Image: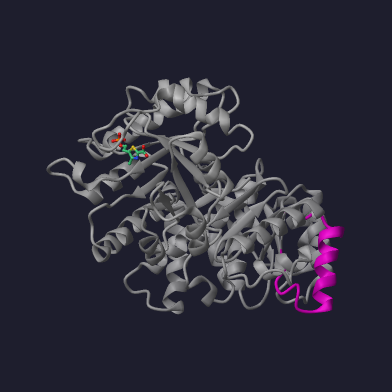
Amino acid sequence: MLVKNIDYSLYLVTDRSLVPEGKTFLGQIERSLEGGATLVQLREKDTETGPFIDFAIKVKELTRKHGVPLIINDRLDVALAVDADGVHIGQDDMPLIQARKMLGPNKIIGVSCNNAEEAAIAVRDGADYLGIGAVWFTATKSNIKKPMEIEGVKELLKTLEKTPIPTVAIGGINSENVCRLIEGSYTGNLHINGVAVVSAIMAADDAKAATEELGQLIHNSFKKIGVNNDKPNDNVLDFAVQAAKNVKATTPMVHHITNYVVINDNANATLSVGASPIMSTNPEELEELAAVNGAMLLNMGTLNNLDTMFRAAKANAKNKNPVILDPVGCGATTFRKEMVRRFLTECDITVLKGNGAEILSIAGLGGKARGVDSVGQAEENIMIEAVKKVANDYGCIVGLTGPIDYVSDGKHVIAIENGDKYLPLITGSGCMVSSVVSCFTAANRDNYLLATVAAILTVTVASEVAAKREYVNGPGTFRSALIDELYNLTNSPEKLKEHARIRVLC
Ligand code: 3NM
């Protein structure tokens, strides 16, 4: 997971000594994630390195499943060993500057601060967030000298108004006092971004219910002070579930002019998600088809029907059908570069869906990225720049697929982290994504941005489920399992919510 838009609102800090009898440490963490913990810090003061790493790997599986960052307390070696999302360091731990050197710019580093001076130094040295505490005395930490209380948190926040940074309050916070803390420490300009709790969740008999209750109280308090704490992901996922249902309910016809290599898979993917494919390349009938189509997909793989493609694009746009362009190999030859430019400028393209190399080439940023399969922050910034630029330049939705997929309408960018290693190993998996994008846009014309996200999410989640099938042991078996899972997933689209790993970047 990359460092972006972290939701600090309900930060679980672990303590294995507090786990009630009859419960397990891992179980408490899992239940809290199910209840909506937005960040997890593994804090192990007495565990040896080897078992710490083993446990961190298990926790990372859980946090990843829930799309939540994993932070390791103090131990950079463990954070590096398990490729955690970041570390949290105290005033007596490794200095922030050294920690940053070791972890690089992409990891989250949080620093515990008790006063304005410590906070100013942490801001100066590049902390990603501050842990502010202790707010109150707590049995969980014995060496608290003087609690800050709500006034102290507010005073500290005031000193940060000119250099705002995410802050998380900690120490003695529970469902009784969390609202007073959030509302009372609000300076009018700056508020805490969340609360970190240990005992209120770790020691709870029902860690899920305890987390849910805290989450609701935090949400209410944020609302009271005018902070929109709605999770954008929720809207995107609710839309995705409904979008899949709409395809099955309306069975839109999707006219493909696609390439010879992938035609059969494109038609099967279309059928599996509940739409109706037609693969005609005959110019005689395209006007008539445009009158009844749900969407038109133009795939530039084998460019043998160029005139028909241009005419089809125009006829479908005239009938207000979404027109999807898959610019296959568009950077490869001068001819293709010219054709994609013409499609984008002469036709009313609704969604341009390509891989990283294709979209970067169209954006004129082709030389900038190290490679489309790297997912560092620098690469992510280039992908974001590319999808926004192309979307703005040509007034369309842009979907860029790769290890992480990015979708933009020129203003917003949504990243999708789902997918399986087999996807790039079968020919035309990207073309299949374009087919599904066509189906979803056909049936969800009120929001092409979210329809495109829903479609890409559907294929990538289906790929993960398919790869887990027992008999899948290579690209061939994966290919048929993928068609099955597209069918199964769109019959029970609520499952998208369980699997989705998306980030709303802006
Ligand atoms: N750090 P509980 S207070 C781990 O002041 C920790 O930096 C603190 O536990 C600090 O939520 C604390 O159970 C313990 O009160 C917080």
Q: Position of residue 373 (x, y in %)?
A: 57, 71
- The span picked out in magenta is 326-350
Q: Can residue 112 be seen in this view?
A: yes
Specify the quarter for ligand 1: top left
Counting every numbered tag in the picture gives 0
Q: Residue at the spot x=66%, y=60% of the render?
A: 383
Q: Can residue 251 be seen in this view?
A: no
Q: Where is residue 130 in the image (x, y as percent from the top left)?
A: 48, 41
Q: Where is residue 151 in the image (x, y as percent from the top left)?
A: 45, 22
For residue 181, above or below residue 263: above
For residue 302, above or below residue 28: below
Q: Where is residue 301 in the image (x, y as percent from the top left)?
A: 70, 74
For residue 205, above or below residue 506: above
Judge by depth and name the residue closer to the eye, 79 or 223. 79
Residue extending furthest toward the left: 21
Q: Residue at the spot x=78%, y=77% of the render?
A: 304
Judge by depth and name the residue closer to the eye, 74 or 9. 74
Position of residue 248 in the picture relative to residue 178 (left or right): right
Judge by depth and name the residue closer to the eye, 206 or 10. 10
Q: Residue at the spot x=30%, y=63% of the render?
A: 53
Q: Which colour scheme is used?
A: one colour
Picture quadrant of residue 266: bottom right
Quarter containing the C terminus: top right
Is 331 inside the magenta-drawn segment?
yes
Q: Residue at the spot x=57%, y=76% of the render?
A: 427
For residue 257, above or below residue 318: below
Judge by depth and name the residue closer to the eye, 75 or 504. 75
